[in-house]
Amino acid sequence: MAAPLALIAFWPTPIDQPLTGQLSGLLTFLHLQGLPTWLDYAAVEAAANIALFVPLGFVTSMAFPRRPAWQNLVLGLAVSCSIEVGQALFLPDRFASVLDIAMNTLGAAVGVAAAGFLQRRRWS
């Protein structure tokens, strides 16, 4: 889990750069077909940031079931902050973003919640 996250986070250029044109074209086509215009490139990027951190929250919660959920959330926040600081300091073609930190932490929270749900179902 850590290796793919590190590859995506510390790739020298934005990981979506090769697909930017195709994704924009697809979104334009889908908007013409009735997809709401609020579902734009920024929304897709935010959703990808959420999805990227769901496994982190889930796995840490399942691996340490007695750890309070807030500690797993703090771990997700710390990992996200570390990534963004690393991008800002060492990757001139990448962009550090507070929004990315928020979306990544939200993804970790979704993972923590999913693990908590499964753990409660298992014990009931």
Image (spheres, helix red, strand yellow):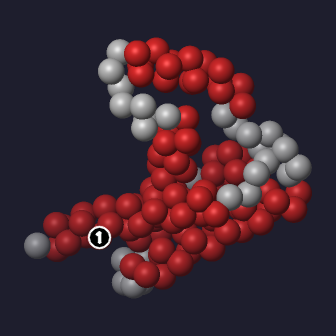
SS at mark 1 in the image: helix
Residue at 60 percent across and 63 percent down: it is 101
Is residue 99 visible from the viewing direction of this image?
yes
Residue identifier under label 1: 116
Residue at 80 percent across and 39 percent down: it is 13
Relative to 103, 118 lies left or right = left
Is residue 48 visible from the viewing direction of this image?
no
**Residue in front for this viewpoint, 53 or 36:** 36
The three-letter code of the residue at mark 1 reads Gly
**What is the x, y in percent for residue 9?**
70, 51
Q: Is residue 75 above or below residue 49?
A: below
The quadrant the C terminus occupies is bottom left
Residue at 43 percent across and 81 percent down: it is 70
Relative to 96, 26 lies left or right = left
Q: How many callouts does the rendering have?
A: 1
**What is the x, y in percent for residue 10?**
76, 50
User: Quarter of the image holding residue 98?
Assistant: bottom right
**Residue in front for this viewpoint, 75 or 26:** 26
**What is the x, y in percent for residue 60?**
47, 69
**What is the x, y in percent for residue 4?**
64, 47
Relative to 36, 78 lies left or right = right
Residue at 70 percent across and 37 percent down: it is 15
Q: Is residue 10 above or below residue 111?
A: above
**Residue in front for this viewpoint, 24 or 9:** 24
Relative to 92, 80 lies left or right = left
